[in-house]
Image (cartoon, rainbow, N blue to C red):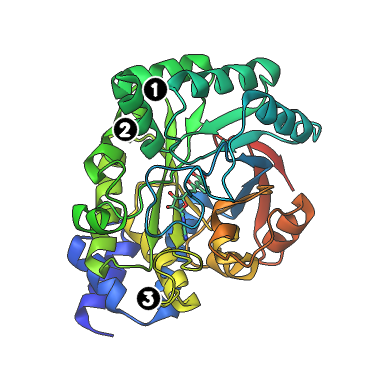
């Protein structure tokens, strides 16, 4: 092994923070077993043998979206045959049905940027869900949606977040971060929050007591340096606020998107490598999620040996990634998740949305 890699290994073993150059060197390494063993070491140090999952339900209020990002197969125009938009009754019907499962602990709510809905619509949905089902955690609205709400309401980001928090919003999902680079966003998603805006929403959310997740969408037009810089931006903000709960990396699925046929889909090799490097660079994140919906269950299981300590949840019923051709199931039972974790020799732990332990299995 070269001196650079020896130095990186020593840093990781001694808990010394890796630099931008180290991150770039890691992406240039193809010693997957070595990357995995280092990431596994760090994972074990920060999180032990527990692998977390939760029992959750996804609700996507609408797929009508003004942003129409090149990487997205979910968003569409209002006049599209596929378009849908839920009213409060539709949402409550889905929520009440899902809540019949006594174990359900979280609604995960991510949607398109609807051109006509006012901010009050979203506030009313959160209020109604919290009033009817106060025991269920509401992880809702990415930083991109929050920026959109500020634009349509004329309120500041802080006002939008404070009002949603008061109405019952508990935490925020990590989507919309894509790659935090102006170059990439200009090309892929110019009609939504910029990198600075995304980070600023997360910062303000953390300052007022709303925890959030972070993510990276990779395997499209970004360079390896841009992946590293993305991870460093998240690490820097986490140093400042400590408000990120977990990091998720989404391998890009090109099917049905503008980029279909132009981008070669990520390999398992790249997915495991990116998982491991994320764990190594994000030394201040306790939780790294192997999102089985994107990775497929077998790769998510492998990723547990490459730095991940969380496998997301039962999900039912996933729409965004399946619009882009995801081959995984649309939901999983707890039993399947538990067996998947057990096979790796690790301990399945059912968690709530704040990573409090519900049950050790
Ligand atoms: O922002 C969209 C990604 C995100 C594609 O916080 C795609 O626990 C790959 O926020 N290929 C939305 N990725 C989903 C999201 C989420 C999902 C699961 C867990 C959590 C969490 C958050 O999905 C988008 C974008 O980054 N995405 N299209 C695609 N074709």
Question: How far across and how far down the image is residue 357, in percent?
Answer: 63, 37
Between the residue at mark 2 and the residue at mark 3, the CA separation in whole angstroms equals 32 Å
Question: How far across and how far down the image is residue 252, in percent?
Answer: 44, 64
Q: Name the residue under label 3.
A: 262
Q: Do the residues labelled 2 and 1 touch (CB within 8 Å)?
A: yes
Which residue lies at the image location 29% right of the left edge and 62% below the top edge?
227
Label 3 residue SS? loop
Please give left or right for residue 223 compared with residue 142 in the image: left
Q: Mark 1 points at which residue?
A: 161
Where 29 sits versus 257, above or below?
below
Sequence-earlier tag: 2 or 3: 2
Which residue lies at the image location 26% right of the left edge and 37% below the top edge?
197
Label 2 vs label 3, nearer the camera: 3
Q: Work out which quarter of the rendered image holds the N terminus and state it.
A: bottom left
Q: Which of 253 and 174 is in front in this view?
A: 253
Question: How far across and how far down the image is residue 162, in percent?
Answer: 39, 17
The image quarter containing residue 101 is top right
Q: Mark 2 points at which residue?
A: 201
Q: Can residue 50 be seen in this view?
A: yes
């Amino acid at each position: 092994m070269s001196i650079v890699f020896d130095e990186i290994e020593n840093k990781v073993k001694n808990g010394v923070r890796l630099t931008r150059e180290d991150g770039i060197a890691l992406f240039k390494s193809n010693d997957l077993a070595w990357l995995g063993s280092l990431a596994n070491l760090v994972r074990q140090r920060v999180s032990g043998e527990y692998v977390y999952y939760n029992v959750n339900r996804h609700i996507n209020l609408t797929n009508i979206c003004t942003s129409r990002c090149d990487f997205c197969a979910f968003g569409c125009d209002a006049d599209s045959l596929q378009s849908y938009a839920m009213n409060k009754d539709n949402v409550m019907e889905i929520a009440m049905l899902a809540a019949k499962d006594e174990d359900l602990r979280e609604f995960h709510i991510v949607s398109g940027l609807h051109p006509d809905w006012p901010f009050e619509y979203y506030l009313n949905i959160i209020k109604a869900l919290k009033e009817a089902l106060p025991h269920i955690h509401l992880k809702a609205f990415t930083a991109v949606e929050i920026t959109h709400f500020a634009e349509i309401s004329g309120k500041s980001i802080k006002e939008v977040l404070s009002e949603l928090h008061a109405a019952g919003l508990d935490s925020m999902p990590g989507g919309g971060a894509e790659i935090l680079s102006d170059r990439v966003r200009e090309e892929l998603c110019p009609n939504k929050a910029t990198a600075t805006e995304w980070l600023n929403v997360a910062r303000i959310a953390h300052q007022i007591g709303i925890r959030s997740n972070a993510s990276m969408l990779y395997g499209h037009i970004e360079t390896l340096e841009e992946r590293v810089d993305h991870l460093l931006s998240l690490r820097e903000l986490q140093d400042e606020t400590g408000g990120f709960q977990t990091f998720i990396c989404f391998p890009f699925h090109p099917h049905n998107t503008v980029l279909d046929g132009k981008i070669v889909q990520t390999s398992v090799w790249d997915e495991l490598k990116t998982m491991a490097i994320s764990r190594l660079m994000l030394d201040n994140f306790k939780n790294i999620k192997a999102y089985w919906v994107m990775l497929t269950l077998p790769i998510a299981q492998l990723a547990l040996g490459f730095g991940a300590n969380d496998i997301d949840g039962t999900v039912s019923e996933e729409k965004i990634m399946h619009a882009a051709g995801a081959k995984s199931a649309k939901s999983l039972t707890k039993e399947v998740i538990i067996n998947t974790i057990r096979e790796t020799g690790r301990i399945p732990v059912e968690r709530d949305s704040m990573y409090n332990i519900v049950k050790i299995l």
